[in-house]
Image (spheres, helix red, strand yellow):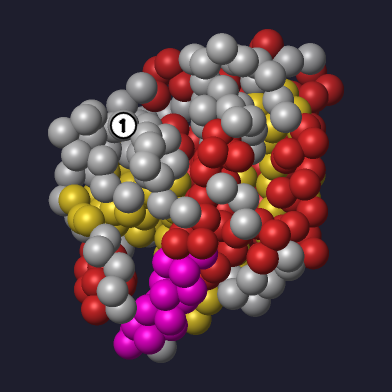
């Protein structure tokens, strides 16, 4: 049977690579060192596969906006805007069998999860993988992945409670997978930011620190009490905490080790680790 071995969370802000020089060297080094810490934890844990939980930035345009989607494919090469992001164009292996199993299991549990055989993975998935699992010389991601995408951007969005419930169901499904696999799960995004909005550049540090305190103390109830309107009031991109909450559900509400919090690159950036 598959076994959950690690949970991680990290910001996916594109400016960290695309506009690296906009922050002073000390802050830049601190941001990069936090990714290196998570990369070290990942390498020590030696997972066989990473389930990524990121959000769709309307990548599939407005033709369809699923609340939750699993990519069921064999491989991917991207991101499409890798030159702007200033990262390699990576080849990514997708663990199709696990993706198919997770999809069917969630549907059987009452979650109407969409799926796509057309991977469109932007910086939300690829920037963290670049830092945590990228072989930059060979242009490959070192581990197979199962990409899960959420709608954290276009209202109506799923409640945080629904995201947490999805995470709990994902844990059950993953641990019932019949093959021997060491599974890591990675949440990306957040925290507060308002991309292209009237408060672009503003970071709501009070909100960010409050959310991280819930995470560190295992206060699931207070976190799930946050409404979409309350979160969106801190910025149009802040609901990416949904991805963190999904992974928190996968980790069954266990308190996280908050590695660091750095306001910068027009976003409240944070990194966290869960050990089962």
Q: Is residue 47 visible?
A: no
Q: Is residue 187 magenta?
A: no
Q: Vertically, is 63 above or below 215?
A: above
Relative height, residue 121 to residue 247 (above, below): above
Tell me the quarter of the picture where residue 70 sits.
bottom left
259 sits left or right of 22 in the view: right
Residue drawn at x 42%, y 66% is: 166
- Quadrant of the rendered image containing residue 262: top right
Question: Is 74 or 69 nearer to us in this picture?
Answer: 69
Mark 1 neighbour class, 10 Å CA radius: few under 14, some 14 to 19, many 20 or more: some
- Range shown magenta: 164-183
With respect to residue 112, does 54 lie above or below?
above
Residue 221: x, y in percent?
67, 65
Secondary structure at numbered mark 1: loop
Q: Residue at x 31, y 26 (%)?
A: 80
Residue 90 point in image, percent of width and height: 37, 37
Residue 121 point in image, percent of width and height: 33, 39
- In the rendered structure, the answer to whether residue 48 lies left or right of residue 111 reads right
175 or 221: which is nearer to us?
Answer: 221
* Disc 1 target residue: 58
Q: Is residue 61 visible?
A: yes
């Amino acid at each position: 049977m598959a076994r959950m071995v690690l949970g991680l969370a990290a910001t996916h802000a594109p400016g960290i690579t695309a506009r690296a020089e906009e922050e002073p060297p000390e802050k830049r080094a601190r941001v990069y060192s936090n990714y290196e810490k998570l990369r070290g934890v990942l390498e020590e844990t030696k997972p066989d596969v990473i389930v990524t939980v990121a959000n769709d930035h309307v990548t599939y345009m407005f033709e369809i906006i699923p609340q939750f989607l699993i990519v069921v494919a064999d491989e991917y090469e991207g991101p499409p805007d890798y030159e702007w992001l200033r990262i390699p164009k990576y080849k990514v292996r997708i663990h199709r069998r696990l993706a198919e199993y997770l999809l069917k299991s969630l549907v059987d549990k009452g979650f109407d999860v969409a799926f796509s055989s057309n991977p469109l993975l932007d910086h939300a998935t690829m920037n963290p993988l670049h830092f945590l699992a990228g072989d930059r010389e060979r242009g490959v991601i070192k581990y197979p992945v199962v990409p899960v995408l959420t709608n954290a951007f276009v209202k109506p969005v799923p409640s945080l409670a629904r995201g947490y419930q999805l995470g709990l169901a994902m844990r059950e499904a993953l641990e019932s997978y019949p093959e021997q696999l060491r599974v890591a799960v990675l949440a990306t995004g957040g925290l507060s930011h308002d991309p292209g909005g009237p408060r672009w550049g503003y970071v709501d540090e009070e909100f960010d620190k409050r959310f991280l305190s819930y995470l560190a103390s295992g206060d699931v109830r207070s976190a799930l009490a946050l409404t979409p309107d309350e979160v969106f009031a801190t910025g149009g991109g802040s609901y990416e905490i949904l991805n963190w909450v999904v992974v928190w559900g996968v980790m069954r509400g266990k308190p996280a080790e908050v590695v660091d919090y750095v306001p910068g690159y027009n976003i409240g950036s944070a990194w966290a680790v869960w050990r089962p």
